[in-house]
Every structure is written in C-alpha cells, then in structure tokens.
Amino acid sequence: MNDRFENINLLRAFAATAVVVYHVIEYANWSSFPANGPLLTFRIGWIGVDLFFVISGFVITRSALALWRQDPAMFARRYWARRAARIVPLYLLTCALWIVLFKRNWFDQAATHLLWQIASHVTFTHSFWTVTYSSMDGVNWTLALEMQFYLAVAMFVPWLSRTPGWRIWVGCILIAWAWRGAMVWFFGHYEPTRLFMRVMQLPGVLDEFGAGIFLAKLLDRRPAPSPRDGAFWAVAAVATGVVCFGLYWSNTSYWDQPAMITFWRTSLAAFFLCVVAAAVHLPTVAWSWPLRPVRYLGEVSYGIYLWHLFAIEVCLWLQYLAPVQFLVVTLGLTVLAAATSWHFFEKPILDRGRRYGDPRSHHPRSVTPDLP
C-alpha cells in the first residue's frame, strides 16, 4: 500500500469541487440546477467540508504518530514546521488580499474591533465569535477548526499512540453529540446561520475528525492489506451512504429538527470513513491517465478552497452572467489561482518547512503522509 495514499487526492478534488459548485449555486441563485440525479449531490456540496475533516483526521493522525515514534524529542519542531508551512502562508495571504480587494473600509473601524479581528485570525480563534467567524474569505472558519484539531493532536499524541482507535472514536462521537445537543438546547431558537456557527465548533465535529483517527489507528503498524479489504470498504460505503442520505433527504428542513442536528453528522462521518478507507485500501488509480487531472486538482485543493470565493466575487462584479457561465468562469479562475499559488508560493514554502522541521534531512519530500 502506497504510504502517500494518492487515491485520497481524488477525494480532495471532489470535496473542493463540491464546495465550489455549491457556492456558485447559492451566489448565482441557480434555481434551475438539477434537483435529482447524480448532480443533486452538488446542491449539498457543503458535505465537501465534512469529507475534508475526515481526511484530515486520518492523514494528520497517521503523520503525527509516525513523527512521534521516530523521535519524541523532535516531534514538536517537525510537526509544527510542517503544519504551519502548509496552512499559514496561504491563509494569511488570502486574508490580506480579501481585505485589500473587498474590505477597503476595514481600517476605518474602531481600533479595538480592528485588533480583535487581527488577533482572532492570527490565533485561529475567529470561529468563536459571530463578528469574526466569516468576516474575511468566508470559508476560513474551517481553517480555525483545522488548526485547533492540529493542536489537540499535538497535545494528545502519546495518548493517541497507545489508545485503541475505536475508543477514541466513541469518545469523539459522545463529545460531538453532547456539544451539538447543548447548542440546540441553548440556541435552538436562533435562525440557522447563527445556530450553525455554534454547532460547528471543534467539539461539534469531533465525530468526523474521530472517524479519520479511527482509520489511522486501524492501519497503524499493519502490513499492506489486500484488495479484498478495499472491496469490503466500498460495499460498506454504499450501505452507510444509503442510510445517511436516506435520512437527510427525508429531513431536509434539518435545522428545525434537534435529532438531526445532534446525531445525523455521525452517519455522514461513518460514510466518509468508509469512502476514505476504500480509497486507501484499493489499488492506486490516481496516476492513471484519465484520473491524473483529477489527482492534480486534489493536490491543489487547499488553494481551490481558499481562492474560489475570490473568483465568485469577480463573477458577481461582472454581473449578468448566466449560471453556467458563472460556474465556468469561477472554476477557471479558481483553478488558475490555485495552480499558480501552489507552484510559486505554497510548495516552495512547504519544502522549506519540511527541511526546517527535519534538519537531518535535505531531501524535499517527506517520508510520512502529509496534510490534505
């Protein structure tokens, strides 16, 4: 089994594309977008974020465990050099550009509010408050959750190393249920956007990160599995997907149903666990010619995720674009920006971060799985 899990790039490509198309549907008011058939998935393209959380739980935990066991004394330096190099530079760049391009009066606000915005975004705590949650490049709230999860992994890596995966996931599920249930109890009367912000804090998505942790522990120190294992996970993905989305499409009002808010995302986490496990266990197909472009989109998916709202703003400025034109222009500009930032900004910094994190090696490629 390829330890870099190239098939996961196919899932990253889907997750990023689903989020982009979903936002185009919303911003372009694309009411005629198909409401049935395979394209219906893009109407709930926000599930791409949930898939990213499961992938992160798997890849980051597996990488952290490898680094911890190689050299506990060097763990913090190596771990944070890689995580910071991968996440922070493009995050800060897009935040700065968002202010320059779309918030020209941003510096006119009171000094205390300005410092609050800066401090919360620099410390990745902007997900905690309504006024900072999505105040710039609206998808950035997920980056706060990612960085908070990285911190949790760094703090608990010795415990993660010795604890069975199923216990970790059960604990994560119970914490997520308790958090989401409490948020519904206290804030269930809020309108969906405000309730969403409170439900989708890190404790409320731990069942999704935990699903990835469970898979990482399941594969921990085991030999490469047979393709039969991949077939099992693929069948399990079909079964859990039928249950998960059957529940959702029967309860699409969602935000007025406490039980759905509290429990449904665990079924989504189980579905994506099976999908990621199938991608990991099945033979690598990401390098085959029909799928190479998709794999590349997965490689630059972080940029796609952070740049696509810029492209949408451009389309809104152009005005009078038909929805299909809106989508084509958005995808084109987004992929162009993501590819450019990956090759000329992200990847050089990431390579330097890897070398800084491991001064004993001058090879630019990590030997452990890296961040999605």
Image (tube, rainbow, N blue to C red):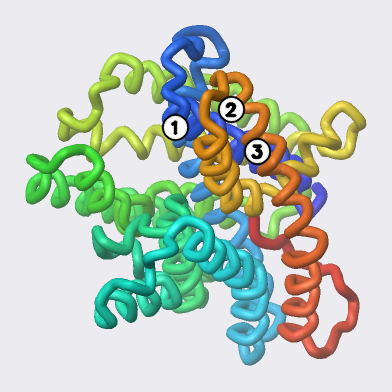
Q: Is residue 68 visible?
A: no
Mark 2 vs mark 3: give the one in front: 2
Q: Amino acid at mark 2?
A: Phe
- Give the crowd class for mark 3: few <14, some 14-19, many >=20 residues within 10 Å: many
To which residue does mark 3 refer?
11
To which residue does mark 2 refer?
326
Horizontal placement of 191 versus 218: left or right? left
Vertical comparison of 207 with 266: above or below: below
The residue tagged with tag 2: helix, strand or loop? helix
Rounded to the nearest angstrom, the CA distance separating label 1 from label 2 is 9 Å
Rounded to the nearest angstrom, the CA distance separating label 3 from label 1 is 24 Å
Give yes or no for contact between labels 3 and 1 (Cβ–Cβ under 8 Å).
Answer: no
**Residue furthest to the top:** 36
Q: Could you tell me residue 218's position as x and y percent? A: 58, 51
Q: Residue at x 17, y 29 (%)?
A: 257
The residue tagged with tag 3: helix, strand or loop? helix
- Give the crowd class for mark 1: few <14, some 14-19, many >=20 residues within 10 Å: some
Q: Amino acid at mark 1?
A: Tyr
Q: Amino acid at mark 3?
A: Leu
Q: Is residue 208 visible?
A: yes
Front in this rendered view, residue 17 or 217: 17
Q: Could you tell me residue 330's position as x and y percent? A: 62, 35
To which residue does mark 1 refer?
27
Figure quadrant of residue 149:
bottom left
Figure quadrant of residue 97:
bottom right
Mark 3 vs mark 1: give the one in front: 1
Q: Residue at x 8, y 40 (%)?
A: 189
Q: Which mark is residue 127?
A: none
